[in-house]
Amino acid sequence: MSGAAVQVEQLQKTYVVPERDAGIKAAMMSLVRRRTRSVAAVREISFAVEAGEVVGFLGPNGAGKTTTLKMLAGLLHPTSGRAEVLGYTPWRRDRDYLGRMALIMGQRSQLQWDIPVVDSYRLNKAVFQIGDADFAARLGELTDLLELGELLRKPARNLSLGERMKCEFAGSLLHRPQVLFLDEPTIGLDVAMQRRIRSFVAEYNRRTGAVVMLTSHYMADVEALCKRVIVIHHGTLLFDGPLTELVRTVAPDKTITVELSEPNTASRAELATLLGGRVAEAPIEETDTGWRVKVPAADTPAVAARLLTGLPVTDVTIEDEPIEAVIEKVFAVPAHDEAHGRASDEAEVRR
Ligand SMILES: Nc1ncnc2c1ncn2[C@@H]1O[C@H](COP(=O)(O)OP(=O)(O)OP(=O)(O)O)[C@@H](O)[C@H]1O
């Protein structure tokens, strides 16, 4: 495999789940003949992440994101395929590997519920064999960065969700992992706390050069942190590249809004003429104070210039399609993955 920090090749995970119809007869039958169903959660995905990169791992519910992160964190064995993280095969659970990565899940606490947070940290200190001086220095740094202060003395069960997440981060980073897998780290947090966690992740990446792979349903997280995104859907990799390229490909238009000193001085037909050429076919919408038009991104400067010279414009704004809308379009691909000749997500198997 190459020297990338994370290298994934043809990774697959199929869960086999028992299946039974309702009723006593079905329960009896299942004793002699077990019926199972296989769920293809991750299908032959391949990608590589270089040291220092922050990559957004996107997909709708059930796409296979958590399953992939769990394999990379060594919590699950794949059905087939290969992965190396920092040169280790994660599911061999090499002690050195576990000491160099962290998986933080927004919906699962890794802190001991009933003891003060700092005592949970002391347990981590022992597990990861962190020296006294390193522990004190790192805890001091993380306490400052995340403003933990008094929280360290409280049991985790007494913390608010946002406070707990800050403490989860600090606890998971005391051993200075070089790879961070973050699964919905801001889920359920208020906007201010989301921003706090986001800037903390960016700062940790900047200070340590750690690789970060992040799943989030909040596009603000992705926009703020990830230049590159990997999109999976139905377990299949749909896109891997710069976020800007994804936006350009899926939403190639920009919206220009002009406010006029004398609203509606230009008729729709006049405006269309002013826009000219194929731009004239773009959707034109009348607003209370002027017009809003959608134009191909490449034509934006020329169109804006024509509007500015041809109309009594008092204000002009040019916007990309909101990232949420872009991602929604990406996810709107059909459930059936014809390109791979698969008829369905789930195949029946009997034994
Ligand atoms: N332990 C399991 N046993 C059986 N099926 C599972 C198991 N875990 C996940 N799945 C199934 O595998 C598929 C992928 O699930 P996964 O949790 O990886 O998706 P996800 O992209 O993380 O979704 P979400 O955004 O909802 O967390 C889904 O169809 C899910 O129902």
Image (spheres, rainbow, N blue to C red):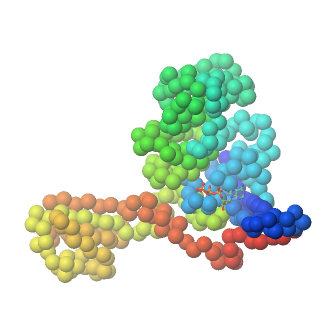
Asked whether the viewer can see residue 34, the reply is no
Location of residue 29 by image quarter = bottom right
- The relative height of residue 279 versus residue 57 in the rendered view (above or below) is below
Q: Say which residue appears at 72% left-offset and 24% top-offset.
A: 126
Q: Nearer the viewer, residue 279 or 151?
A: 151
221 relative position to 289: left or right: right
Task: Give the image quadrant in which the ligand numbered 1 is located.
Answer: bottom right
Q: For the view shown, which residue lies furthest in the front direction? A: 24
* Quarter of the figure with residue 342: bottom right
Q: Is the residue 230 above or below the residue 264 in the image?
A: above
Q: Quadrant of residue 280?
A: bottom left
For the C terminus, the quadrant is: bottom right
What is the x, y in percent for residue 137? 58, 21
Image-based side of 40 in relation to 174, left or right: right
**Foreground of the two, 25 or 134:** 25
Q: Residue at x 44, y 50 (%)?
A: 220
Q: Is residue 264 visible?
A: yes
Residue 309 image point, x, y percent: 16, 68
Identify the residue at image location x=62%, y=42%: 108
Q: Residue 88: horizontal and vertical position, in percent?
A: 76, 45
Residue 45 location, x and y as percent? 68, 62
Above or below, 330 relative to 77 = below
